[in-house]
Image: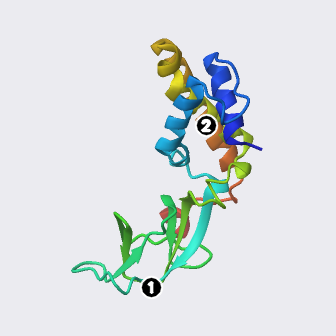
Amino acid sequence: MSTQLSLYNEALRLIGERRLASLAENREPRRVLDDIWNDGFVNACLEQGMWNFATRAVKIAKSVTTIPAFGYINAFAKPSDHLRTVGVAEDEYLNVPLTRYVEEVGFWFADIDPIYVRYVSNASAYGNDLTRWPQSFSKYAAAYLAAEAAVTLTQDTKKQQTLLALANYRRTEARSRDAMADPTVFPPQGAWTAS
């Protein structure tokens, strides 16, 4: 189970700094990590994949206040906890992908009503709940946090490059492990098979 303190300590270990006893400890490394954390760190990590632990599905009805001037006839407001779209579908089982839609700032536009959307959420019950983070994602986040703090704490750009490479490796591993939780998907039937 991850906590902010455990992520900080993992990041500090990777950098080569002494651990923190608490998040209230008055040391420069804690202040640097706090700045990174408060500057959208969790959202930046969650945007790096279509993480199952942070994904939610919702049914969205068309907006009654926003009406498109042309093109698609319905506008659908994005939820406030939306970070990254995983898929948009026509049916509640998310089996029929919606292929005729446009995503713009704050809205999806389509001709049907309602739409069903799966997205990566930063809500406190989804992506922002550190206790839901798999160990592989926590390891990636800690390495990324270390890479972000490395130059400020050590003035060593080579260490930062090494930590960025580690973060990229751990992100790939975390994505692979997370993808194994997806249901079996069959490729679409080809034209030769259909005839």
Quarter of the image for the N terminus: give it: top right
Between 101 and 83, the one lying in front of the other is 83
- SS at circle 2: helix
At which x and y percent is residue 34?
55, 36
Q: Which residue is mark 1?
A: 113
- In the picture as drawn, the residue positioned furthest to the left comes out as 69
Q: Is residue 85 visible?
A: no
Residue 141's label in the rendered image is 2
What amino acid is labelled 2 in the image?
Ala
Between 37 and 65, the one lying in front of the other is 37
> Residue at the location (48% across, 66% down)?
80
> In which quarter of the view is residue 162 placed?
top right
> In which quarter of the view is residue 171 placed?
top right
At which x and y percent is residue 17?
64, 17
Between 76 and 18, the one lying in front of the other is 18
The disc, 2 or 1, on the residue closer to the chain's N-terminal end is 1
